[in-house]
Image: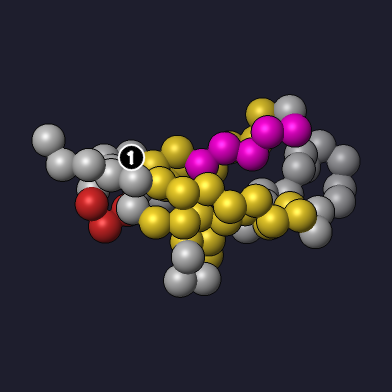
Amino acid sequence: MPAGMGHPQPPWAKEDGKELKANEKYELQIVGKRHILKIHNVAMEDAGTYQCTCEGDKMLYQLSVKGM
């Protein structure tokens, strides 16, 4: 990786395998060794399993959404 380019963004995906890209809905950040996915304007359809694959490791996160 060229100097000054920072870390490559880890691939985030939802349970259907669709890769998530940074946009108005999804904010992808790297802070030190932490990889952060922020979901804006969360809706019921956002519920499910999200995964981050980085350096050969896969981490799974379960998001539940409850109506008000």
User: Considering the numbered disc 1 on the image, is that residue within a helix, a strand or a loop?
Assistant: loop
Mark 1, other Cα within 10 Å: few <14 / some 14–19 / many ≥20: few
Left or right? Give the position of 42 relative to 60: left
Residue 52 shows up from this direction: yes
Residue closest to the far left:
68
Closer to the camera in the image, 58 or 19:
58
Q: Is residue 26 magenta?
A: no
Closer to the camera in the image, 8 or 56:
56
**Helix, strand or loop for the magenta stretch, by majority:** strand
Q: How was the colour assigned to the protein in this rendering? A: secondary structure
Identify residue for label 1.
40
Q: Position of residue 3 (x, y in %)?
A: 87, 41
Residue 30 occupies quadrant: top right
Residue 20 shows up from this direction: no
Closer to the camera in the image, 36 or 22:
36
Q: Position of residue 34 (x, y in %)?
A: 68, 33
Total numbered labels: 1
- In which quadrant is the C terminus drawn? top left
Three-letter code, disc 1: His
Left or right? Give the position of 29 relative to 4: left
Closer to the camera in the image, 67 or 17:
67
Q: Position of residue 41 (x, y in %)?
A: 26, 40
Residue 12 occupies quadrant: bottom right
- Residue located 64% across and 39% down the image: 35
- Residue located 76% across and 39% down the image: 6
Left or right? Give the position of 51 relative to 14: right
Compared to 6, does 43 lie above or below?
Answer: below
- Residue located 65% across and 51% down the image: 59
- Residue located 28% across and 44% down the image: 65
Boundaries of the magenta span: 33-37
